[in-house]
Amino acid sequence: MIGLEHIVKVYNGTYKKLAEKLGISSPTIMGWLSKKRPIPKSKLEALSKMFGIDEEYFHKELNEVEKVQIELEYLNRLSKKNSMLIPDVVQDDEGIQHEIMVMFDPHEHEIRAKYEELAIQKLLLRLKGVLYNESFSSDFSLDFHFNLLKGVCDILEEDNYFQVTDRGIEIEGNSSQVTAIQTLVYILNNENKLAFGHREENAFTLELEALLHKYKLLSPSHVLGIKEDPFFKDVDH
């Protein structure tokens, strides 16, 4: 599907009406959609001006992020067109009610949901890039990045939970949550050192490092920070 098809659908248009506005026949547009013929430069310019969308989006294959961006642009246009002032009543500090006019946008909730969908699609696109790059760089083996993200999904999908107590990690249900957290912590390790690099020693990093070690979320060979720090007194060495 090229962008033109998605754009016409989002804007509730028809190819017949679009053809009339462009001064061409409907079969010509169908030829564009089937990629049997390219969209001429002059028509791309006309489409861009008509919809207020960059030319490139009409003849390219759209990814999910671009599709949602187009849908969001359409909703924002509707918002500007359909928003209106409506009366409302507010109460001041003395309990006296006053009637005021407030702006009401009938598309507010839909736009908010669409922004959330856009954020999700952007994240999914990034994750796909990470997974595919990892696969291609390691002879198509879905290894570290794939397993890391799979572990995150496992913990998010679990109804069970675990608690960190004085006795250590107590698991309610199976141990997939702990396994996922251990996987996440693993990425913080770089040759048995936390990925803070050569950092300034401060209370936060020291305490975090000690806690991870205490609950055995770091490898036994991991070298702790300043051992003299009082926080380390309860950590098994």
Image (cartoon, helix red, strand yellow):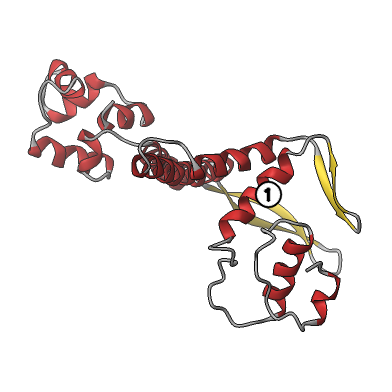
Looking at the image, is 53 positioned above or below residue 43? below
Relative side of 96 to 156, left or right: right
Residue 26 vs residue 54, the one in the foreground: 54
Could you say where residue 118 lies in the image, as x and y percent from the top left? 47, 44
Could you say where residue 134 lies in the image, as x and y percent from the top left? 40, 44
Looking at the image, is 97 positioned above or below residue 200? above
Q: Residue at x 84, y 42 (%)?
A: 171
Q: Is residue 106 visible?
A: no
- The three-letter code of the residue at mark 1 reads Ile
Disc 1 element: helix
Assess disc 1: are there few (<14), some (14-19) or many (≥20) residues with their C-alpha within 10 Å of its C-alpha: some
The quarter of the picture where the N terminus appears is top left
The quarter of the picture where the C terminus appears is bottom right
Could you say where residue 21 lies in the image, as x and y percent from the top left? 18, 29
Counting the numbered discs, the total is 1
Q: Residue at x 35, y 44 (%)?
A: 137
Could you say where residue 226 lies in the image, as x and y percent from the top left? 70, 81
Residue 124 vs residue 221, the one in the foreground: 221
Q: Which residue is mark 1?
A: 181
Relative side of 97 to 122, left or right: right
Q: Is residue 84 visible?
A: yes
Looking at the image, is 166 positioned above or below residue 128? below
Residue 41 vs residue 122, the one in the foreground: 122
Residue reaching furthest to the right: 166
